[in-house]
């Protein structure tokens, strides 16, 4: 009986640790504004790339899935040094490329200063057909 | 006219010689109104200060360190457990918790380019370079290259009538056995929050009790934070950092147009002091 109780406690602790390990990542600034349960595909031409610390970003002019508005989208990313760990290079995305980018959209679809919609990078299908990040229409981006 | 030209040429040619003739002391005297100094206190890097005889420190934490978030990413925060908040801080904390539960940003000051400040700068998800000298420890976070210096040369805190409050405050350290005890005060309060929007007052004090563990592979900071205007008693939290030898910190700046490209920061201005 004591052994069973110990086993139960051990399983409980293990599950607790597993849950703690699986906690969703939060950015060094809040990413609460993004709906991390939704992934929108934006297909279009890249109009700007900022490959810079503390956050890389790029803008895409195109169409969006799931009834999200067409037009300009600003894609927030994590820091270049983290992206490079994920296979990114400085020139992975260039102005003029046609890409399909997967994003967690803003919960409240505010229009940004330049009139664009906003989202958090989850993955991308590049101009040459190769992919980076998660491109199965699921997943949670991170800005940390 | 030729004679005048010759005199001018000689005078111009002699100028560098005249300048060279000035001693470093004379030049410093000329610039006395521009060079900041604290009378009676040698700077931490002055050779006379560096070379003073001192007991050998129990450890040297020089290295590049990364905050240990391997248990849970949320460990970058300093609670829970939280102290008993009072007054406005209690209301702000509860509002921050409500907003967080609703998936909304609140007081995202760091996202707006305000310095993270102590203690939050220490747990950004970036490496920190630390350099220990006999008189001072320099810490530079890779996040916005935020700079801290901890004086360990025996000096006192600055005169409160003249001190400049800063986001990382003024830090003075001393060794107690195998522990480096660092006290920090004079911490800027404007849009400076802990965790989810907890404000600080000018009476905010931080003590860090620092130990080097596991043959120098782990650096542990025990935080003891007090602010009688915002919470009761001590707010305690212990954090660890891992030595990371195959990296260096780089240059990071919060640019004026950074937020034009970051949707989260444009959505995250709620609750800030404007």
Image (cartoon, coloured by chain):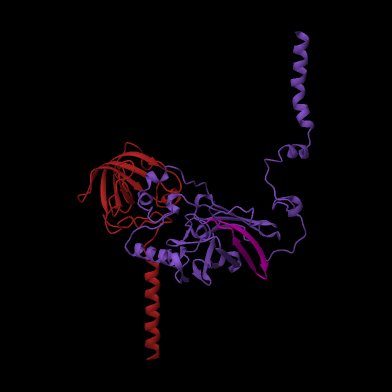
Chain colours: A red, B purple
Q: Quadrant of residue B7?
A: top right
Is A87 left, or right, of B78 in this rendering?
Answer: left
From where the camera sits, is residue A127 visible? Answer: no
At a point 77% along the width and 37% down the height, the residue shown is B26
* Residue B41 horizontal/vertical position (percent): 73, 53
- Quick check: is B217 in the magenta stretch? no
- Quick check: is B183 in the magenta stretch? yes
Name the one closer to the observer, B249 or A55: A55
Please identify the residue farthest to the top as the structure is shown.
Answer: B1
At a point 40% along the width and 49% down the height, the residue shown is A87
Is B147 left, or right, of B97 in this rendering?
Answer: right
- Majority secondary structure of magenta residues: strand
* Residue B169 horizontal/vertical position (percent): 58, 57
At a point 30% along the width and 43% down the height, the residue shown is A116
Q: Which residues are magenta?
A: B168-188
- Numbered-mark total: 0
């Amino acid at each position: 009986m004591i052994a069973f109780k110990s086993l139960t406690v051990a399983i409980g602790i293990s599950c607790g640790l597993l849950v703690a390990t699986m906690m969703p990542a939060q950015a060094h600034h809040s990413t609460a504004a993004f709906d991390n349960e939704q992934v929108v595909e934006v297909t279009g031409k890249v109009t700007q790339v900022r490959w810079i610390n503390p956050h890389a970003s790029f803008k895409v002019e195109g169409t969006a899935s799931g009834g999200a508005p067409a037009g300009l989208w600003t894609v927030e990313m994590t820091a270049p040094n983290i992206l490079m760990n994920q296979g990114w290079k400085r020139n992975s995305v260039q102005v003029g490329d046609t890409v399909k980018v997967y994003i967690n959209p803003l919960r409240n679809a505010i229009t940004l200063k330049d009139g664009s919609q906003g989202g958090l990078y989850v993955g991308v299908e590049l101009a040459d057909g190769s992919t980076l990040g998660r491109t199965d229409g699921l997943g949670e981006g991170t800005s940390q | 006219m030729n004679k005048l030209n010759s005199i001018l040429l000689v005078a111009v040619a002699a100028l560098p010689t005249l300048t060279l003739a000035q001693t470093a002391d004379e030049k410093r005297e000329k610039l006395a109104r521009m060079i900041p100094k604290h009378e009676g206190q040698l700077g931490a890097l002055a050779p006379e200060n560096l070379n003073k005889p001192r007991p050998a420190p129990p450890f040297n934490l020089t290295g590049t360190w990364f905050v240990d978030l391997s248990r849970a990413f949320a460990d970058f925060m300093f609670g829970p457990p939280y102290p008993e908040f009072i007054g406005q801080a209690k209301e702000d904390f509860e509002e921050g918790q409500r907003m967080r539960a609703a998936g909304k940003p609140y007081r995202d000051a760091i996202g707006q380019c305000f310095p993270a400040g102590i203690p939050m700068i220490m747990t950004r998800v970036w490496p920190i370079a630390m350099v220990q000298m006999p008189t001072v420890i320099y810490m530079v976070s890779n996040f916005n290259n935020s700079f801290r210096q901890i004086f360990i040369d025996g000096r006192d805190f600055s005169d409160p009538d003249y001190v400049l409050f800063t986001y990382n405050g003024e830090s003075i350290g001393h060794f107690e056995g195998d522990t480096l005890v660092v006290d920090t005060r004079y911490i800027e309060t404007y849009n400076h929050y802990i965790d989810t929007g907890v404000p600080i007052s000018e009476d905010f004090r931080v003590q860090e009790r620092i130990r080097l563990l596991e043959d120098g592979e782990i650096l542990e900071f025990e935080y003891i934070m007090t602010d009688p205007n915002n919470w009761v008693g001590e707010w305690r939290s212990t954090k660890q950092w891992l030595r990371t030898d195959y990296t260096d910190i780089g240059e990071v700046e919060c640019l004026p147009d950074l937020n034009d490209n970051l949707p989260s920061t444009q959505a995250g201005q709620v609750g800030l002091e404007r």
